[in-house]
Amino acid sequence: MLTTTFAERPDLAARTSEIPSVWPEFMQHDEVVKRYWLRLVTELPQFQLVLYDEERDAVVGEGRTVPFRWDGLPEGLDDVLVRGFASEGPPTALSACVAIVSPDRRGEGLSRFLIEGMRDVARRHRLETFVAPVRPTLKSRYPLTPTERYVQWTRDDGMPFDPWIRVHTRCGAEVLGVCERSMVISGTVATWEQWTDMSFPDSGSYVVEGGLVPITINRQADRGEYIEPNVWMGHPVD
């Protein structure tokens, strides 16, 4: 299994489109993410990762990261992207943005290669801190449970209940805190009905498939809003 950067293997970077989407439709409409996502590739290819199965000639995963100047934990993914492209001096930290493994290769432990690859990128660029706004895999099954409580759940063996938090923990990370406003996705009521294939006949909170928390619908204002919480985890760089 080869983990390399977009800068080192642009031919493999071009094949990341082969990885099927794993996100609910509404997750693709965060305006801050849309503003900066392509810039990660065009301006910072040395910080983006591709996971390649050489035996099968298959691109099986990708990881996006952004370097930023550390002055405390950002509010979440949106905030760290803004800070990463702000002119605040040389970066001193690296944040993961996303780590995706092809759905048909899940359960093989491949995500660990991406996390270790990100840590290696931080070392190579002499960045002092590596953090990740982790999207808990199973939180969408418990959207009414406060995230602060969810992250405290453990299995019988003492490891975190959530599989994705567990992977990061096994890589040496620790929970730094919950970022309640990691991503903000807003749209008209009709747009939300299209994204979710649901009807929202009244104002209020609604549980939607794939959401970590309910969305809020305001029919009078014709707006729906989803504010996604993530979990900040800190990894040792050395």
Image (cartoon, rainbow, N blue to C red):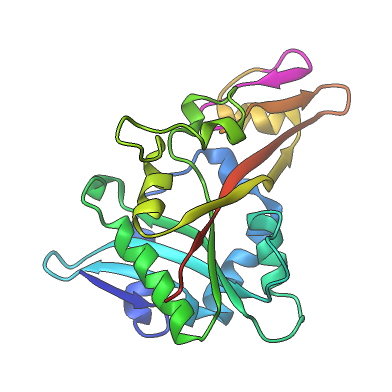
205 in the magenta segment: yes
Task: Count numbered badges in the picture.
Answer: 0
As drawn, the residue found furthest toward the left would be: 55
In the picture, which quadrant includes the C terminus? bottom left
Residue 84 at x, y percent in the picture: 67, 72
Looking at the picture, how far across and down is residue 2, in whole percent? 24, 73
Q: Residue at x 63, y 41 (%)?
A: 229
The residue sitting at 31% across, 30% down in the picture is 156
Q: Specify whether 4 is left or right of 105.
A: right
Q: Is residue 14 among the parts visible in the rendering?
A: no
Give the overall secondary structure of the magenta segment.
loop
| Rendering coords of residue 106 (x, y %) | 26, 47
* 223 relative position to 32: left or right: right
Residue 119 visible in the displayed image: yes
Name of the residue lying farthest toward the right = 220
| Residue 10 versus residue 218 in the image, above or below | below
Query: Is residue 62 part of the magenta span, yes or no?
Result: no
Q: Is residue 134 above or below residue 61?
A: above
Magenta-drawn segment:
200-211
| Res. 76 image quadrant | bottom right
